Amino acid sequence: MADERPARELTRVEAEERLGMVELVHRVLDRGALIHGDVIISVAGIDLVYVGLRVLLASAETMRQKQALPLRTPGRRAAGRDAAGRDAAGRDAAGRDAAGRDAAGRDAAGRDAAGQDDRARDG
Amino acid sequence: MIARGMAEGLVAYAVLPQGVLPAPDVRGLEGAPTHAVEAEGLALWVSAHHHAPSPGAAAAQAHHAVVAAALEGGVTPVPLRFGQWLEDTAAAHRVLRERAAEWHETLERLAGMVELGVRAEPARAGSAARSVRGGAAMDGTAYMRSLLERHAERRATAADADALADALHAAGADWIRQKVVDARPAWLSAAYLVGRADAPPLRDALQRTARERAVGSFAVTGPWPPYSFT
């Protein structure tokens, strides 16, 4: 039986807590200095090379099922990649497609389809 | 390479000047005690683990807690991104040797600084999201017209976000040392590097500007360790 209770609006405190968590995760996962070129961590026994928030927060099981993420064991080519290192979706190990755009549609310089640079106004 | 079995590796959190050490009660991922590996005038804050910890929101919070403890100690650290794994102490010393010049320069640039974050949605963004609805009832011409209208509205919203970014920067120009702006059609995300003492007046100026411009939604977060300026 469907739950017919009306959706409850977040209180201001709850909304602020959620925003704080989003901001924290964004910074910890997408910003900060790197020691190595890649961030490598093990999820459920799989060595995972990830870039960005969406990959880290996806469950290992979801990753296995959808094969949406670039999985790699250091020193071995990831399963399901062709000779050019592209996966079934045509994306390379960095998640870029044949046109060099990443999953968010940005090119190698970080510009999106409209030419907007992530750090366009970086002071 | 990830450590396996009982081999012990290090999770790294932040780089600080040599001699700046974590307090005994600063705990890292999975509650592990933290310590510093020191070399080349630098201190790399780490915790030892038998395996690379699993990622997740709690792990991200634990990582941030260590970096924040460094900032609260009075010295602005070079925050490291989550998931930095070193095989052993020798690897930590090797990294400190290789990156010493870069990290000394970054520590000098970030000294006395914190980061404030802004998330904003221009008032128009909500209507842009609602502009194409009920496609099943439209004929082809009406549908194409609605697409054109949505495109025009998205462009206008992006212009609003750009204008808001410019207004915020102008309002905080006296305090902002550096900025990173990510303006997308429906929202604006910005990070500002600012002196510790300047963070409160900058926050006030940003909030005042948002009120004056009747922004749809707006929040200032922080002060953060300067993750966005490494």
Image (tube, rainbow, N blue to C red):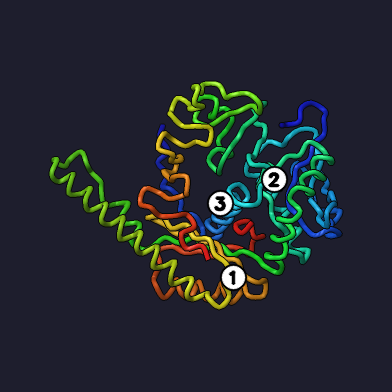
Left or right of residue B50, residue B114 in this image: left
Q: Disc 3 vs disc 2: which is toward the camera?
A: 2
- Is the same chain shared between marks 1 and 3? no
Q: Which residue is mark 2?
A: A35
In the rendered image, residue B20, in percent from the top left (x then y), is placed at 83, 60
| In contact (CB < 8 Å): disc 2 and disc 1 | no
* Residue at 73% from the left image edge and 35% from the top image edge: B52
Q: Would you identify the image quadrant in which residue A14 lies?
A: bottom right
Q: Secondary structure at mark 3?
A: helix
Q: Spatial distance from mark 3 to mark 2, Cα to Cα? A: 24 Å
In the rendered image, residue B229, in percent from the top left (x then y), is placed at 61, 59
* Residue at 28% from the left image edge and 57% from the top image edge: B153
In the rendered image, residue B68, in percent from the top left (x then y), is placed at 71, 58
Which chain's residue wears label 3?
Answer: A
* Mark 2 crowdedness (10 Å alpha carbons): few <14, some 14-19, many ≥20: some
Residue nearest the viewer, comparing A78 with B66? A78
* Residue at 65% from the left image edge and 65% from the top image edge: B114
In the rendered image, residue B14, in percent from the top left (x then y), is placed at 73, 52
Q: Which residue is mark 1?
A: B177
* Residue type marked 3: Val
